[in-house]
Image: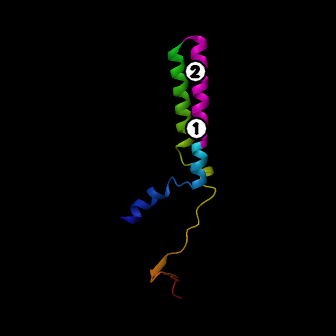
Amino acid sequence: MNSFLKPITDFGKIDFEGQKLAENISTSILVVSAIISLVAGKMLDNMKLAMYIYLFGFVLTVLVVVPPYSFYNKNPVKWLKKSDFKSGNTILKEKPQ
C-alpha cells in the first residue's frame, strides 16, 4: 500500500519558503487585479467588465500558485535523524554496520 501512495505523496512538495513565495504572489496578483477591475469598471461604468477582469486575475493566480513548480522547492527542509527518547535523553539511532 505504501508503494502505491509514494508517487502521489512525492508529487507537489514545496518547502516553507516556497509557501511564503506562493502566498506573496497570490496576494499581489489578486490585489492588482482588484484595483484594475475597480478602476476599469468605474471608468467604463460596466460592472460586468469589472467582474470579468477580476475573474481573469483569479484564474491567473490559480495557474501560477497551485501547480507545484520547481522554484517553490529551492530550500528543502533537512530533517533530523530519528531519535529514541529514554529518560529525557535523546539517543540517536545509528545504522548497524
Quadrant containing the C terminus is bottom right
Residue 23's place in the image compared with 4, above or below, is above
| View extreme (bottom): residue | 97
Res 56 label: none
Q: Residue at x 44, y 56 (%)?
A: 8
**Range of residues picked out in magenta:** 24-45
Residue 60's place in the image compared with 66, above or below, is above
Tell me the amino acid under the disc marked 1: Thr
- Horizontal side, residue 95 vs residue 36: left or right: left
Q: Residue at x 61, y 47 (%)?
A: 21
Q: Nearer the viewer, residue 62 or 83?
A: 83
| View extreme (left): residue | 1
Question: Would you name the residue on which mark 1 appears?
Answer: 27
Quadrant containing the N terminus is bottom left
**Residue 70, image x, y percentages:** 60, 51
Q: Nearer the viewer, residue 91 or 89?
A: 89
